[in-house]
């Protein structure tokens, strides 16, 4: 019969002591019920900070989560009151003391997991009741922070795995891209190198057939010559299969390698070089294969009587020009084939540029340039 009266008296006494705030008993009861309900750490941490601030009439409260040797703010009330930049270092398993702030460590199964802190306005100190409430809430918050840290560790691990998966994906993309580049490079080298030999052989075989019908002796002589050129073609194919540049280019440089090609060209071809030295092999290969492609087009399409290649090194630019006296074409309206695309790709990859000028009856000129730096002389 006296119980309702006692409860009313208790509530009245609480209002006298705590005002409109809940009593420590009420705070702890509600907090225990909250923990027992099906709330995750993402809900409980902000609730803990808010409950702590309201129950102590603090201006700011914070729930700290331990990560390594630091305390990081996991939840604050009001939200955003503490920034991540305010992370605090732990010393000897002790939470750092901050002027004007009261706190309590959060332990669980003998391990320091974090802390609760409150700050009051002005110089108002925390009351004994505030400190007691801090300690009680800290003792109940251990499992909450344990779950929160497990979630944080899981998120960090998932983020790490996502980064690793992304790096693996990018690595695979780089491998595929490199394989594609190698295939395209091999295709260009075959198209621009060995195919040049084969085109020349095809033209000379037709000429040998014509000569054989008119002069068997001359035809036989040309066939013997073609036998040697077949061997040269096989050597070029072997070099490509081995993944190396033509030996003449690697050993003698750009001028020497193009002179070797001029010797087997089915039409007279002049190679003129000004100021050339040795350059990185990739740069030499770019110009070499572009010149071969242009010469091959002269033989296949131009109906020319001669061709000329001009090489120059000036002002850090290695330039080349391949010109013929063939029938030419309308450069504005004629679509370029794969050969021109190969040349453009090579030159662009080296940071250079290429241009084709032609007109019907005026021959064709292919001009290109790439930035180069001469190789240092061997010591």
Image (tube, grey):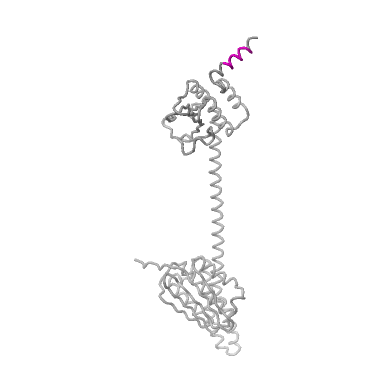
Dominant secondary-structure state across the stretch colored magenta: helix
Q: Farthest right residue?
A: 1
| Rendering coords of residue 19 (x, y %) | 55, 21
Please give the range of residues in magenta: 4-12
Q: Quadrant of the C terminus?
A: bottom left
Q: Nearer the viewer, residue 275 or 29?
A: 29
Instruction: Inspect the magenta stretch and tell me whether residue 164 lies in it.
Output: no
Q: Quadrant of the N terminus?
A: top right
Above or below, 298 relative to 123: below
Above or below, 62 relative to 201: above
| Rendering coords of residue 377 (x, y %) | 36, 68
Q: Farthest top residue?
A: 1
| Rendering coords of residue 238 (x, y %) | 52, 69
Image mark count: 0
Q: Farthest bottom residue?
A: 214
Q: Nearer the viewer, residue 123 or 340?
A: 123
| Rendering coords of residue 212 (x, y %) | 59, 87
Please name the residue shown 53% across and 28% down the image. Answer: 53
Q: Quadrant of residue 10?
A: top right
Above or below, 227 relative to 11: below
């Amino acid at each position: 019969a006296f119980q309702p009266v006692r409860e009313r008296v208790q509530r009245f006494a609480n209002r006298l002591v705590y005002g409109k705030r809940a009593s420590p008993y009420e705070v702890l009861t509600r907090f225990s019920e909250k923990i027992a309900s099906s709330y995750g750490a993402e809900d409980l941490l902000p609730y803990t900070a808010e409950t702590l601030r309201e129950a102590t009439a603090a201006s700011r409260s914070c729930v700290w989560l331990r990560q390594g040797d630091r305390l990081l703010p996991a939840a604050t009330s009001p939200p955003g009151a503490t920034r991540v930049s305010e992370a605090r270092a732990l010393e000897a398993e002790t939470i750092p003391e901050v002027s004007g702030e009261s706190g309590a460590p959060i332990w669980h199964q003998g391990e320091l997991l974090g802390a609760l802190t409150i700050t009051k306005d002005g110089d108002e100190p925390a009351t004994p009741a505030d400190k007691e409430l801090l300690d009680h809430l800290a003792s109940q918050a251990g499992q909450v922070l344990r779950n929160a840290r497990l979630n944080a560790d899981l998120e960090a691990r998932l983020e790490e795995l996502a980064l690793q998966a992304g790096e693996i994906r990018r690595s695979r993309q780089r491998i595929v891209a490199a394989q594609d580049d190698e295939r395209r490079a091999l295709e260009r080298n075959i198209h621009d190198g060995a195919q040049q030999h084969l085109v020349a052989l095809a033209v000379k075989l037709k000429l040998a057939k014509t000569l054989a019908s008119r002069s068997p002796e001359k035809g036989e002589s040309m066939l013997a010559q073609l036998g040697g050129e077949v061997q040269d073609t096989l050597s070029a194919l072997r070099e490509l299969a081995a993944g190396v540049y033509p030996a003449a280019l690697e050993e003698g440089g750009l001028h020497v390698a193009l002179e070797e090609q001029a010797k087997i060209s089915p039409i007279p071809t002049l190679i003129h070089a000004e100021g050339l030295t040795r350059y990185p092999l990739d740069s030499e290969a770019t110009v070499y294969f572009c010149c071969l492609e242009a010469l091959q087009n002269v033989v296949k399409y131009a109906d020319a009587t001669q061709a000329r290649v001009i090489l120059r090194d000036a002002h850090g630019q290695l330039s080349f020009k391949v010109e013929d006296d063939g029938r030419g074409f309308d450069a504005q309206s004629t679509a370029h084939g794969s050969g021109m695309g190969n040349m453009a790709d090579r030159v662009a990859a080296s940071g250079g540029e290429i241009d084709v000028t032609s007109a019907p009856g005026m021959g064709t000129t292919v001009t290109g340039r790439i930035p180069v730096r001469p190789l240092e002389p061997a010591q």
